Amino acid sequence: MAESTSEDPVLPPLSAADFRLFNRLAEEMEFYHSMLRSTWDQVYAGTAPGSRLKPSQLISLGLRFCQHLEVHHDIEEAHWFPVLGRKMAGFQARGFAKEQHKEMHKGLERLVPYLTGCRSGDRELRREEVREIMDSFAQVLWSHLEDEVRELGAENMRKYWTKDEMRSFPF
């Protein structure tokens, strides 16, 4: 992530309209991240001992979360990161965003086959195992959801992009 240094220029306050313009991507990202957080919380709650979530519901919800996260990352990496990475190191090939994606996908590479095996009947669902897999990538997921929105926030974006560039983003 970009860190502020004493060499960063002091920028004038943003008007309300300019703040909305520079903050647009952060708000859009927060919208999607909120949905991911909500689904994660539902799945995680379903792994608790005594959860009333039926095994089939937990499996379906868990697989839906995995699919949504994978699609979200695919869109980011195909459309957002190439554009943002032109000026922002965090979105480049070795930037924080792609590195965090790689770490999250290690968890998904365990969770998807586990839940798929449960759905097909090849294995018995054990809620504590689902929770252990989720715990293995929870920290990087939650950090990523915050880090990405922070990077796309108005005060940071205006360090890299002009108003015209913000208006011309293809997303």
Image (cartoon, helix red, strand yellow):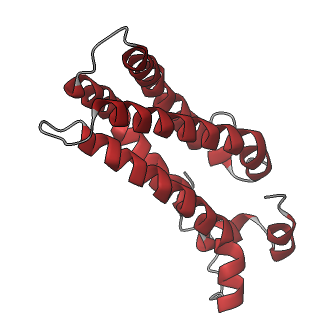
Measured as percent of width and height from the top left, residue 55 is found at: 29, 30
Q: Is residue 8 left or right of residue 56?
A: right
Q: Quadrant of residue 56?
A: top left
Q: Residue furthest top?
A: 122
Q: Residue at x 63, y 39 (%)?
A: 71
Which residue is nearer to you in this view: 129 or 92? 129
Q: Residue at x 58, y 35 (%)?
A: 70
Question: Looking at the picture, does residue 56 appear above or below residue 122?
Answer: below
Query: Is any atom of residue 144 visible in this view?
Result: yes
Measured as percent of width and height from the top left, residue 122 is found at: 37, 8
Q: Is residue 121 left or right of residue 18?
A: left
Q: Residue furthest bottom?
A: 15
Measured as percent of width and height from the top left, residue 79 is found at: 77, 46
Which residue is nearer to you in this view: 86 or 116? 116
Question: How many numbered callouts?
Answer: 0
Measured as percent of width and height from the top left, residue 140 is found at: 41, 39
Question: Looking at the picture, does residue 14 appear above or below residue 126?
Answer: below
Q: Residue at x 45, y 17 (%)?
A: 113
Which residue is nearer to you in this view: 160 or 28? 28
Question: Looking at the picture, does residue 158 appear above or below residue 4?
Answer: below
Query: Is any atom of residue 15 visible in this view?
Result: no
| Viewport quadrant of the C terminus | bottom right
Q: Residue at x 41, y 52 (%)?
A: 37
Question: Looking at the picture, does residue 74 appear above or below residue 127?
Answer: below
Q: Is residue 35 left or right of residue 78?
A: left
